Image: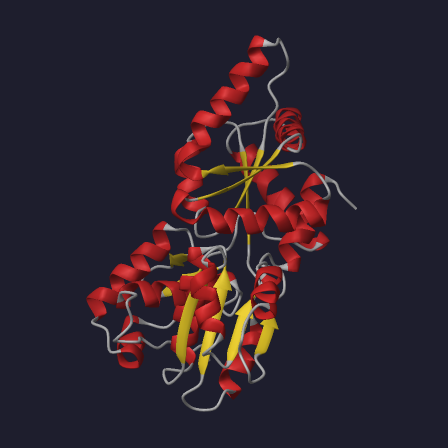
Amino acid sequence: MVQFFIQTDSEIPAATQLFDQLSFAITSRAYTNGEQLPSTRQLAQWTGLHRNTINKVYKQLKQAGLVETKGGSGVYAATPKQEAQSLDVSIQVVRQALDRLLTLGYSLNQAQNIFNTELNWRLSCNAKLIVTSGQEDLGVGQIIAAELTQALNIPIQTIALENLVDTLDQINQSQINQEQPILASTIVTNRYFAEMVHKILGDRPMRVFTIDIYNYSQEIARIRQLPQGSSVGLVSVSTGVLRLAESLIQSIRKDVLVISVLAQDTYRLQSMLKTVDLVITGHSAQVVKQAMANSDRIRPLEVMYSGNYISGESIRLLKLELGIS
């Protein structure tokens, strides 16, 4: 069972802590697609939060596209829009879609044209791959872009969510001025920003591909093993990743001190390395190694280097989408 805990003396608001913990549980597949989440009564008992606060958190998760409600029976982890399907299930999906089009009055020839148009549009979107994240957390966009560049070996552009529409319109206008065909794009983001991306793009013909994140199971297991009163240092270029990791650790071990440091804050990083028992980092591994080499710490320091931020399944699905073997 997934555990949820609110650190009352944390600088992170209690509602934000719960939102982060539930978001992580969903995006890392601790709750699989369609699985029911705890009721507001259960969460109130576990966390001490008022049920009104929990309802607001669930409402935020629904607005973010992470959960859905089913006929008043509860709250469930939402299914991503590009969920992988087995061959047999995919045939059923196609047949159901055809049946639906026929009931709406379309002929089979018209349905074929609709499918072909959609397929051609998807394929055209592969011409350009863009990663986006919020202006307040450009670091997570940099992490996603770096991993995709390594995994796919194709050019990738990173654009802040707030600048996405203006930048795309500028690119399109430039192509028009040069009398070039307008290339459609595939926008890649994580599930925290997906709903905002859809709203910002509106009816623009852009493909949005949503990734799931690494589940940090090894790091969680190590946190559980730490002696009472231990301290953990977190290092990342992303403020969102740091906030999420801090909330997650506090939900597992309320007796553990957590110190979060941005990789670019070299002074704070050096200070943290002198005091903590364990450091966890991912893409900032080289920065941490360099800081450790310059540190005057005497006793040994345990460092865990996390796996990729993007789940392997999301990479596999994106490769299929882009036609990359």
Q: Nearer the viewer, residue 179 or 271?
A: 271
Residue 207 image point, x, y percent:
55, 35
Q: Is residue 113 left or right of residue 189?
A: right
Residue drawn at 36 percent across, 54 percent down: 62
Q: In the image, what residue occupies the spot 61% across and 66% down?
A: 289
Image label count: 0
User: How far across and how far down the image is residue 259, in percent?
Assistant: 41, 71
The relative height of residue 175 versus residue 142 in the rendered view (above or below) is above
- Foreground: 269 or 54? 269
Q: Is residue 302 above or below residue 236?
A: below
* Residue 8 visible to the viewer: yes
Residue at the image point whose x is 71% and y is 39% from the top: 154
Rendered location of residue 229, percent (x, y): 40, 88
Image quarter of residue 72: bottom left
State the image quarter where residue 107 is shown: top right
Please provide percent x and percent y for residue 165. Answer: 44, 29
Does residue 91 appear in the picture of this structure?
no
- Which residue is farthest right? 325
Judged left or right of residue 120, residue 50 is left
Q: In which quadrant of the rendered view does residue 95 lie?
A: top right
